[in-house]
Amino acid sequence: MNKILDSTNFVVQNSRFVKINKARVAEFSMSFEHGRINHWLSQAPFDFSNFSEDEELRFTLIFNSLSFCFWGDPKWTIENNGRFFDGAWGMVVALGRAIKEKFPLLDFEYCLKLSKDDFQKILRANAEIPLFNERLNILHEIGTVMAEKYGGRIDSLLEPANGDALKLLEIIVQNFPSFRDVSRYKEKEIYFYKRAQLLVSDLCQMLSKRGILFKNVDQLTACADYKLPQILRRFGIFEYVPSLAEKIDNKIEIPHDSKEEIEIRANTIRAVEFIKGQVKARNPKITSMGIDDHLWLASQEKFPDEKPYHRTKTTDY
């Protein structure tokens, strides 16, 4: 049983605010480029070539622990070598810059006692990043758990999973409270595990370069965030009732764990499953996470008439 798919399917079946347009799913699936799908990190605006394999894994854990809720007014934006980055790319650049500036971010002992002053320097930009204190607390949590339970070693986190991506996912959500992304809808628990799934996917893809292959990676679902619903709407796959469309288009905040927000996220996961089901006929090896990477990278392109993404303040995504 996949509790993410099972629980989110319950939401889809009961959705009032969000609808998936099956005709547009078929249209998109037919045009889906099913050649080589780039892992999103390979497109990141930071050169990881000087990192050891262990440092790459550590960076991935730190990054995924902090990659959420970048929107604000003004939007948190970082300048680097004459270019400007926001969102997840901005976080990659900020962390990479900090490491170049000799902040020992890849040392979990440092993370568990990171000062507010140092963290402000690490994330310095045109404005303070949203949920700054929550991010600092999460980094303390990551540092504490990794240092005290796993001896500061990524391998010690990975070994109990025995090469199973779903086991690794459970290890992460059980040991790191900040990765427990669960909501309630009609008295039922709904599992999303957005950042935890992305972390597992990233770790598994990096380990595959060493010849270490995890099973059940194909059981990971899409990551229900801000950008995927936005691009699904661009393709006409997502349809919102007028009241929700008006809120999103006018950038009115949608409360975390509201029915509207949960339906947006659950339908995101189900839409990608529908796409995967159709693309699999041409490409049996396609995964939900591969489609997720494709959509997320496409969503980074700026369009002048782009509809906004929904605004929800949360550490989950």
Image (cartoon, rainbow, N blue to C red):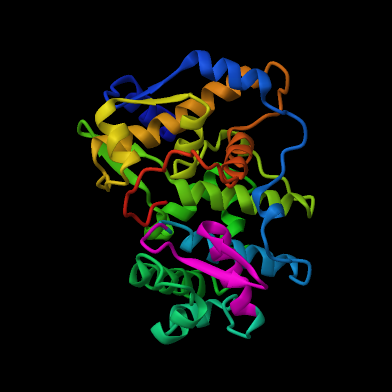
Q: Please name the residue shown 79% across and 50% down the image.
A: 211
Q: Please name the residue shown 41% across and 72% down the image.
A: 127
Residue at the extreme front: 304
Q: Give the magenta-colored segment's residue range.
A: 71-99
Q: Is residue 138 toward the left or the right of residue 205 in the image?
A: left
Counting from the top left corner in percent of width and height, residue 212 is at 74, 50
Q: Quadrant of residue 165?
A: top right
Is residue 1 among the parts visible in the rendering? no
Counting from the top left corner in percent of width and height, residue 4 is at 42, 35
Does the magenta run of residues contain 88? yes
Does the magenta run of residues contain 273? no
Nearer to the camera, 116 or 233: 233
Nearer to the camera, 273 or 29: 29
Q: Please name the residue shown 55% across and 53% down the image.
A: 199
Q: Quadrant of residue 91?
A: bottom right
Nearer to the camera, 236 or 113: 236
Counting from the top left corner in percent of width and height, residue 149 is at 48, 70
Nearer to the camera, 278 or 107: 278
Residue at the extreme left: 187
Is residue 270 among the parts visible in the rendering? yes
